[in-house]
Image (cartoon, helix red, strand yellow):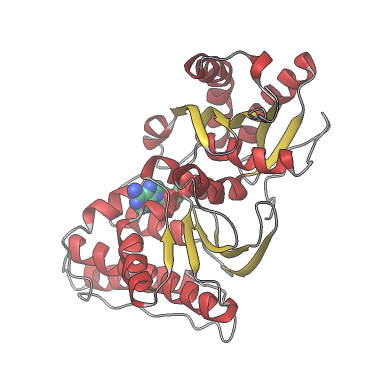
Amino acid sequence: MVGMSKDTIILGIESSCDETACSVVKNGRIIMSDIIASQADFHEQYGGVVPELASRMHVDAVYPCIETALKEAGISLKDVDAVAVTYGPGLVGALLVGLSAAKGICAATGLPLVGVNHLHGHICANYLCFPELEPEFLCLCVSGGNTQIVHVKSYTELEILGRTRDDAAGEAIDKIARVIGLGYPGGPKMDKAGQGGDISAYSFATSHMGDTLDFSFSGIKTNALNIINQSKQKGEEIDIKDFAASYQHHIAKILCDNTMKAVNATGVRKVCLAGGVSANSFLRRAFDEASSAHDIELYYPKLRLCTDNAAMIASAGYFEYINGRRDDLSLNAVPSLKL
Ligand code: KG4
C-alpha cells in the first residue's frame, strides 16, 4: 500500500548467562513472542551458575527455543528482517551458543546479523514497556555484574557517567544473601526476606567517591560480613528480616542518591531503571519516592523484562539495525564487552 511503511521484524537470541531466550519483536516495541528457558533451578544445587554446564544446557535449548518463538509469533524465518544476538558481556561458552545459532541462521538464509550488547538490551526493556518513551534520559543499569549510570542520548548513543569501581550492586546483595543462608539466586530471596523489616535496624558505611558519579560496594559488603561475624562471635543471631531490609535499603539509597546527583549534573529529568536488580522492591521504592520529591519522570520495566530475556535484545537489535549496524559471520563473543 502506498505510503504505508513496512514493519520491521527482529528475531532476538540471548544466552549470556543461565537463560536461553528467543523472542520476536516488531518495530523495536511490540513483543510478538518471548520465550525463556531458565536453568536457575538446575544451578541452585551448586549455589551459582556453573559455566560449562550452562553452555551445554544452552546447546540443548537454543533451537527449540527459536522454533517456539517463531511459532508463537505466527511467523517463519521468511518474515524476519534481521537476527539480533547478544555477543557480550557474559560467560564466553554461553555466549558462543546463541551466537553460533544466530550465525547459522544468517548463513543459511542470508538474513543480516546484528550483534547486541547485553547492557544495551537491558536499557531497551523500557521501550518494550513504555511505547511513548524516547531518549534522551538517564538510565541506572544494575545487574549481577554491572552497576552504571548511563546517559542515553539517542537510541544508539550511550555515555557512561558513573560506574562501580569494584563490585556490582547485584553481586553485593547476592553474596550477603548466601552468607545469611538464603541461597541462590540471592537477589529475589533477599528481597522477599526483607519485606516488612526495619530499614534502620542495622547501619552500614557509605563509600564516598568524591566528585564522581562512581559507586563502590565492596566496603559495604565487608561491613555487612563484619556485622554478621561479630554477632556470631557474641553468640547472637542477626535478625534476618531487619538485616535484609536495612542492607537493601542502604544499597538502594546509594544507587538513588548518585542517580539524583547525575540528574542535577545533566539537567535530564527523565530516569529509567534497567537490569535484574531493578526488580528489587527496595530500589523501586527509593526511586518512586525520590522521583516524586524531585519532579522526575521515572520508568522501570515490568518484572519479567528486568531479568535476562531476548525481547530486550531484539529491541536493541532493532534500533541498531535501523541505525545501519550489520555484523559479519566473524562476529565473536566478547565476555567483558563494555557499553
Ligand atoms: O540482569 P540480570 O538478570 O543478569 C545479569 O545480566 O547480570 O541480573 C541478575 C541480578 C542478580 O544479582 C539477581 O540476584 C538480581 O538481578 N535479581 C533481583 C530480583 N531478580 C533478579 N534482585 C532483587 N529482586 C528480584 N526480584
Q: Is residue 239 left or right of residue 110?
A: left
Whole-percent x, y for residue 205 in the image: 38, 80
The quarter holding residue 231 reads bottom left
Q: Nearer the viewer, residue 119 or 246?
A: 119
Q: Nearer the viewer, residue 222 or 105?
A: 105
Q: Residue at x 77, y 14 (%)?
A: 108
Q: Residue at x 29, y 78 (%)?
A: 203
Residue 238 seen in this snapshot: no
Whole-percent x, y for residue 74 in the image: 51, 14
Q: Is residue 111 left or right of residue 127?
A: right
- For this orientation, the residue located farthest to the bottom is 210
Q: Nearer the viewer, residue 91 or 211?
A: 211
Q: Check the image and report above or below for 251 versus 91.
A: below
- For this orientation, the residue located farthest to the front is 2
Q: Check the image and report above or below for 220 versus 143.
A: below
Pick the quarter of the image with the C terminus. Answer: bottom right
Q: Check the image and report above or below for 306 versus 32.
A: below
Q: Is residue 136 left or right of residue 191?
A: right
Q: Residue at x 64, y 46 (%)?
A: 89
